[in-house]
Amino acid sequence: MATSPLRHEVIRIYKELLYLGREYPLGYDYFRPRLHKAFKAKSNLQNEEDIRKGIAQAEYVKKGKADSQ
């Protein structure tokens, strides 16, 4: 089974959010499990359009986090 080209995008945004989570006010130990849970909840997506929507949502969260710093 070939890996989806979107897989790399999902991993990239996950890592970026993890990195930004180090500065989270409640701490990294609070942030990381919640991020993992959010990504795990979307792990069953198969449709490319749905995956792209999830990536867009993560990018939105990332921008909001970056703007608040």
Image: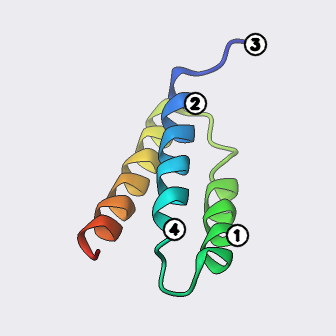
Tell me if label 1 and label 4 are in contact, CB under 8 Å. no
> Label 2: which residue?
7
Based on the displayed image, in which of its 4 quarters is residue 34 positioned? bottom right
Q: Nearer the viewer, mark 2 or mark 4?
A: 4
Q: Kindly give the residue lying farthest to the right in the view shown.
A: 1
Seen in the picture, residue 40 relative to 46 is either above or below; the reply is below
The residue wearing badge 1 is 33
**Which residue is under mark 3?**
1
Marks 4 and 3, how far apart in space? 33 Å
Which image quadrant: the C terminus? bottom left
Left or right: where does residue 54 sit relative to residue 44? left
Mark closest to the chain's N terminus, 1 or 4: 4
- Residue drawn where x is 61% and y is 64% of the image: 35
Q: Position of residue 7 (x, y in %)?
A: 58, 30
* Residue at (50, 57) in percent of width and height: 19
User: Which mark sits nearer the N-terminus, 3 or 2?
Assistant: 3
Circles 4 and 3: CB atoms closer than 8 Å: no
Identity of the amino acid at label 1? Pro
Q: Which mark is residue 21?
A: 4
Residue lying at the far bottom in this picture: please name it.
26
Looking at the image, is mark 4 or mark 3 earlier in the sequence?
3
Secondary structure at numbered mark 1: helix
